[in-house]
């Protein structure tokens, strides 16, 4: 179940990032917010994966 949530979160992050960049290129005001949201989602997934890997190394 956790892997499904990570894949969905990463997919949404990529979607928001691509949509945000496309909006920035079209010069709409919401593009930057979309791109930032996508980056934050991807950053959260990466941080979660790194934390889990560290916990597995300790055990």
Image (cartoon, helix red, strand yellow):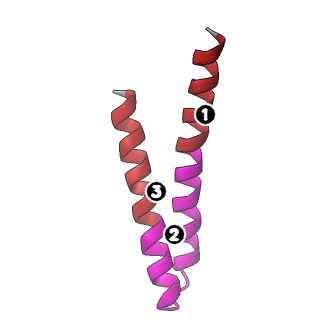
Q: Residue at x 57, y 25 (%)?
A: 52
Q: Residue at x 45, y 65 (%)?
A: 16
Q: Nearer the viewer, mark 3 or mark 1?
A: 1
Q: Is disc 2 placed on a helix, strand or loop?
A: helix
Reading the image, the residue beneath label 1 is 50
Mark positioned earlier in the residue sequence (2 or 1)? 2
Reading the image, the residue beneath label 3 is 13
For label 2, the crowd category at 10 Å Cα-Cα, with few meaning under 14, some 14 to 19 and many 20 or more, is many
Q: Which residues are magenta?
A: 17-44
Between residue 36 and residue 47, name the one nearer to us.
Answer: 47
User: Marks 3/1: CA distance?
Assistant: 17 Å
User: Marks 2/1: CA distance?
Assistant: 24 Å
Q: Is disc 3 placed on a helix, strand or loop?
A: helix
* Quarter of the image where one finds residue 56: top right
Between residue 55 and residue 57, name the one nearer to us.
Answer: 57
In the rendered image, residue 58, in percent from the top left (x then y), is placed at: 66, 12
Left or right of 5? Residue 52 is: right
Q: Nearer the viewer, mark 2 or mark 1?
A: 1
Q: Which mark is residue 31?
A: none
Reading the image, the residue beneath label 2 is 34
In the rendered image, residue 41, in percent from the top left (x then y), is placed at: 53, 52
Q: Is residue 8 above or below residue 59?
A: below
Q: Is residue 21 above or below residue 52?
A: below
């Amino acid at each position: 179940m956790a892997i499904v949530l990570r894949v969905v979160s990463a997919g949404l992050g990529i979607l928001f990032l691509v949509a945000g960049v496309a909006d920035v290129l079209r010069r709409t005001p919401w593009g930057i917010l979309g791109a930032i949201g996508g980056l934050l989602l991807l950053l959260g997934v990466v941080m979660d994966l790194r934390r889990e890997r560290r916990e597995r190394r300790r055990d």
